[in-house]
Image (cartoon, rainbow, N blue to C red):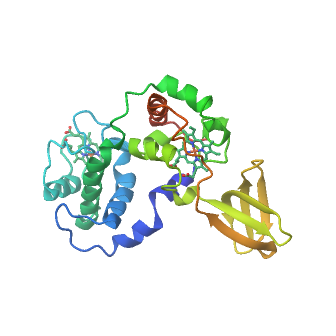
């Protein structure tokens, strides 16, 4: 659904793209890496996958590239492609933007092992945990099953890296994607509710109430408070899952690459 668009165009990274200094090799700022992440999501993820390892013999997410070593070689490879393969040329990605992609690839390689200590996971067991003990479907939807209060996870495996899934489960507050933020509303007569922002214009706001999953519409002139919630409504599963269960769950999420409903 439309949320994907929000995710791959984080407003801040796009703004920064215009103002990047010339990059020194191997030294990148957080904002350059963020900008590269957005570029990667737009141009590369569909073939290389969120962890860069979707294509056999062309793992670009773990510092193993066979064809490029230096930043300049990566930039050239991105802009010129590899003739005779599905690795097309990206002449429209200018040198500066290509540099940010290289920054992101380097940062992927250096953060990839955060979840590497986990034992191998089992997709089927992970599904059982997702639907049973984890209670994930009380908030999340996969295919046509589950709730719509949390983000739809039907395609999460095509969008997020394993380390990101790991962090989402253990530290839900660490990073909340703007499109996933919740809104707290207090009306002038004092009733309060929290929900997912669906739509708004100058006069009204529509939200999906977390409690009953119903769409509610408010006239802005009737509201006393209207603020984004900084904590995630999702509980941390840090002490609720064994290492094996965590790994199974992540394997299941990583396998979800279908169409969102
Ligand atoms: C249409 C699918 C496709 C897209 C989109 C794509 N690639 Fe590729 N890429 C490939 C394939 C296939 C290969 C392997 C080519 C070969 O060596 O046979 C490859 C190879 C590479 C390599 C060399 C890997 C190595 O081992 O040296 C790099 C680096 C690379 N791609 C980066 C990117 C980046 C960055 C983007 C986004 C700007 C991107 N690719 C977009 C399909 C794609
Ligand atoms: C009480 C509701 C609730 C429960 C239960 C819950 N989640 Fe969440 N989850 C959310 C909300 C809301 C978000 C969006 C805000 C955020 O990123 O924390 C979220 C975010 C996520 C994300 C990140 C999505 C993205 O787009 O990056 C993942 C992955 C995730 N949840 C997995 C799970 C799994 C797996 C379980 C079960 C073990 C679970 N959640 C249980 C509410 C919930």
Question: Where in the figure is residue 74, as x and y percent of width and height?
Answer: 18, 54
Question: Where in the figure is residue 183, as x and y percent of width and height?
Answer: 66, 62
Horizontal relation, residue 103 to residue 257: left or right: left
Residue plotted at (76% across, 59% down): 193
Seen from the viewer's position, the closer of residues 71 and 191 is 191
Looking at the image, which residue sits at the far right? 189
Image quadrant where residue 162 sits:
top left
Residue plotted at (33% across, 37% down): 116
Horizontal relation, residue 39 to residue 237: left or right: left
Up/down of 261 relative to 230, above or below: above
Up/down of 27 relative to 82, above or below: below
Horizontal relation, residue 135 to residue 41: left or right: right
Residue plotted at (57% across, 55% down): 180
Residue plotted at (45% across, 47% down): 167
Seen from the viewer's position, the closer of residues 85 and 55 is 55
For ligand 2, the image quadrant comes to: top right
The number of numbered badges drawn on the structure is 0
Question: Where in the figure is residue 233, as x and y percent of width and height?
Answer: 63, 51
Image quadrant where residue 87 sits:
top left
Question: Where in the figure is residue 225, as x and y percent of width and height?
Answer: 73, 72
Q: Quadrant of the C terminus?
A: top right
Looking at the image, which residue sits at the far front? 239
């Amino acid at each position: 659904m439309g949320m994907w668009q929000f995710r791959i165009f984080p407003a801040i990274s796009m703004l920064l793209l215009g103002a990047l200094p010339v990059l020194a090799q191997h030294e990148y700022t957080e904002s350059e890496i963020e900008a590269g992440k957005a570029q990667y999501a737009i141009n590369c993820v569909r073939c290389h996958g969120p962890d860069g390892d979707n294509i056999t013999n062309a793992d670009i997410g773990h510092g193993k590239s066979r064809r490029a070593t230096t930043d300049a070689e990566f930039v050239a490879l991105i802009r010129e492609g590899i003739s005779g393969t599905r690795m097309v040329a990206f002449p429209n990605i200018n040198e500066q933007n290509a540099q940010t992609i290289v920054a992101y690839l380097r940062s992927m390689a250096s953060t990839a092992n955060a979840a590497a200590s986990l034992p191998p996971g089992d997709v089927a067991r992970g599904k059982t945990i997702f639907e049973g003990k984890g209670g994930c479907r009380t908030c999340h939807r996969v295919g046509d099953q589950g709730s719509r209060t949390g983000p739809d996870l039907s395609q999460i495996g095509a969008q997020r890296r394993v380390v990101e899934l790991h962090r989402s489960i253990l530290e839900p507050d660490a990073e909340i994607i703007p499109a996933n933020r919740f809104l707290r509303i207090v009306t002038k007569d004092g009733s309060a509710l929290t929900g997912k922002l669906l739509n708004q214009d100058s006069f009204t706001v529509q939200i999906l109430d977390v409690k009953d999953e119903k769409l509610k519409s408010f006239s802005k002139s009737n509201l006393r408070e209207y603020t984004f919630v900084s904590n995630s409504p999702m509980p941390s599963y840090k002490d609720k899952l064994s290492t094996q269960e965590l790994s199974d769950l992540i394997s299941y999420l990583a396998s979800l690459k279908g169409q969102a409903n």
